[in-house]
Amino acid sequence: MKTINSLNVITFKHPQGCCGYLIADKTSKEALALDVHLDLVHDMAERVKTEGWKLRYVVDTHTHADHPSGSRDIASKFSCTRIAHEKAQHAGVTAHPKNGGKINLGSLEITFRHAPGHTPDHMVLIADGALFSGDSLFIGGVARTDFLGGDAGLLFDTIHSLLTDLPEDTVLFPGHDYQNKNESTLGKEKKENPWLQIRNRDEFIQKLTANPPPKPANMDLLLLLNREGVDIPPTLSADEASRFVSDGGASSVIDVRTGAEFEGEHIPGSRLIPLDQIELRADEVRAAAAPRLLLCRSGNRASMSKKTLEKLHVAGLSVIDGGIIAYEKSGGKTVKGRAIISLERQVRIVAGSMVLTGVLLGFFIHPAFLILSGFVGAGLIFAGITDWCGMGFLLMKMPWNQSSAAENAPSAGGTCAASLPPCAGTCAASLPPENKKTS
Ligand SMILES: [Fe+2]
């Protein structure tokens, strides 16, 4: 927690490079949640309770195109007023502050300022020595302006008016921190941010628009979720998944089968995270753009992965119904490698062999060997009731089920903060050309 004058601020970072904030008045403990990522709703809600704060408002600085907003969910937990700019048109938002509009947390005054550039509906929040800049000014960077009605010239005007109007010791809290720089002030940015060294508006526009990064994965769907408040469905039919992938969503498909099964056949661009590693590698799932589609052979292991991930509060998950078998039947494109025996078939072969061995040994050697058959039968009943198969987990770890594909899988959408190139997150512009070599 950072304290600035009468303000307490807690930053919540997401592996996609997004920053959400809890902002509270020290005295009254009235609080506001800003730019809540759907994956972080649980953590932020728990922290509000731990701190004993009264969450009154939930704000989105703009329409997010790179991640699902959790504003609706956290607002409903605490019966908060949702706030966004009037141009945002988000379902469920009831307060639309004008430029210069204010709200109070106890005696702390928070001012909203219209800050177009990244999007036309963008606002920043100014509060007692702090600037919550959303996607306008970042630490060492600025926002991109190449989609959703963005305007590089307006971004230049927005940023320079903030720099003119606010003191240099104003602490900067940006909407993204792709490079984990953690803290800065407006004075520091004035000196060190390469984009702020460009004083000519036309030159800024030319450089900002010259080399736009790829658009965020699943952008159209995310806009639908964030604007209209629809839910991500728990399952997706193979037909729907096939359309989702052909629309550019392959990097959001998480394949939870074994490495060998993946090598045998997989959806091009999907990422392999086997079921027995899903808990340890949950942050890799978080780093993939939502919705994340979980895939296995027939749907069973994907459902188990979903349960595990949801216990870890990963949101925005859908299971591809019928797995890769149904996906291929629906006409979805896959890449095939060497022929393999699926894990389900391996379980059947091993279980059947053990039962047969027990019966034969019991008949020809000693009846005590029948215990082996009984043990396997009991194990299969247990697996059927609990939907958890110990033999399957054991077989997953066998060397013939591993593959180098696990290491060589493509990255999940390039939105993981740790693996992003400098200043190339989904909402940040690249550095100006002459600064690239030194970044
Ligand atoms: Fe953004």
Image (cartoon, helix red, strand yellow):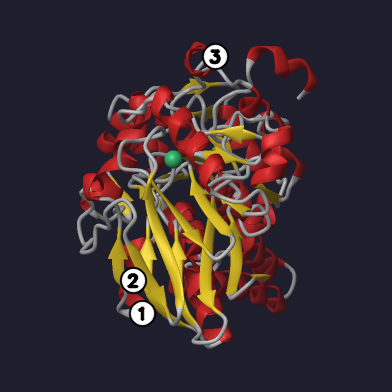
* Pointer 3 with pointer 2, Cβ within 8 A: no
Give the labeled residue for mark 2: 75
Label 3 to label 2: alpha-carbon separation: 39 Å
Q: Nearer the viewer, mark 3 or mark 2?
A: 3
Number of residues whose C-alpha sits closer than 10 Å to that of mark 1, classed few (under 14), some (14–19) or many (20 or more): some
In primary-sequence order, the first of circles 1 and 3 is 1
Give the SS element for disc 2. helix
- Depicted 308 relative to depicted 183: above or below: below
The answer to whether residue 427 is seen in the rendering is no
Q: Residue 91: x, y in percent?
A: 20, 56
* Pointer 2 with pointer 1, Cβ within 8 A: yes
Give the labeled residue for mark 3: 207
- Depicted 386 relative to depicted 239: above or below: below
Q: Residue 439: x, y in percent?
A: 76, 25
Q: Which mark is residue 269?
A: none
- Identified at 37% across, 60% down, the residue is 59
Give the labeled residue for mark 1: 78
Is 425 placed left or right of 78 in the picture? right
Number of residues whose C-alpha sits closer than 10 Å to that of mark 3, classed few (under 14), some (14–19) or many (20 or more): many
Q: Which amino acid lies under the numbered mark 2 shown in the image of this protein?
A: Ala
Q: Which amino acid lies under the numbered mark 3 shown in the image of this protein?
A: Lys
Confirm or reject: label 2 Cβ below 8 Å from ligand 1.
Answer: no
